Amino acid sequence: MKPHLKSVKAAKIILIVLALLVAWIAFQLGTHRHTGVLRALVKTKHFLTDASISHVMPQQSPIVTAGSQHRVTLSWKASTSAVVGYNVYRRSSLDTIKLNLVPVAGTTYTDRTVQPGQTYFYVTKAVNVKGAESAASNEIRADIPSP
């Protein structure tokens, strides 16, 4: 077979595959329109656009203070995007909770609710004006000493 005929045959196969792909996409959109696929795609696009906040990066390891009451102080670098604040999350062996009721305005947070002998993991997320959160920062570990 001549090299020219091979490339023509390959081009025809690619065109057939593309035509089938376009037909399948058209069928899916036509059949599932009632399920809100297009609406979901538009909402996803808007969410991703609104949530395009730079990642929050922890600046240092948490500072664990021992004494009559243990506490963990976290600090991080400010986001380069316009944000109203940050949400701080703590994960333990039992669950994950958001520690603040309203976004933290600064770049430090002190958790005064830790228990002796426990290990906690923290992340922060930047919050924009619409309340959308960025992806989580790197997770930071804090080992609380026993009394």
Image (spheres, helix red, strand yellow):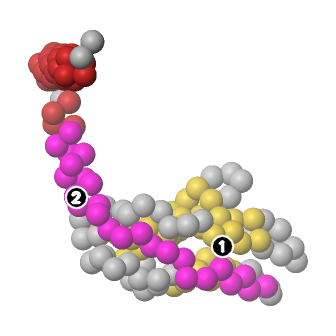
Give SS at disc 2: helix
Residue at the spot 24% in from the left edge and 46% down from the top edge: 44
Q: Is residue 103 visible?
A: no
Residue at the spot 22% in from the left edge and 58% down from the top edge: 49
The quadrant of the picture occupied by the N terminus is top left
**Label 1 amino acid?**
Thr
Instruction: From the top left corner, tell me how far across and down residue 92 is, in percent.
Output: 68, 58
Residue position for label 1: 113
Number of numbered discs: 2
Q: Determine whether, in the image, residue 71 is placed left or right of residue 103.
A: right
Residue position for label 2: 49
Observer-nearest of 60 and 72: 60
48 is higher (above) or lower (below) than 57: above
Observer-nearest of 91 and 139: 139
Q: Residue furthest top?
A: 1
Q: Is residue 60 magenta?
A: yes
Range of magenta residues: 41-66
For marks 1 and 2, give the one nearer the viewer. Answer: 2
Observer-nearest of 118 and 14: 14
Give SS at disc 1: loop
Instruction: From the top left corner, tell me how far across and down residue 143 is, in percent.
Output: 77, 71
Instruction: From the top left corner, tell me how far across and down residue 40 is, in percent.
Output: 21, 37
Q: Earlier in the sequence, mark 1 or mark 2?
A: 2
Instruction: From the top left corner, tell me how far across and down residue 12 is, in percent.
Output: 17, 17
Q: CA distance from mark 1 to mark 2?
A: 35 Å
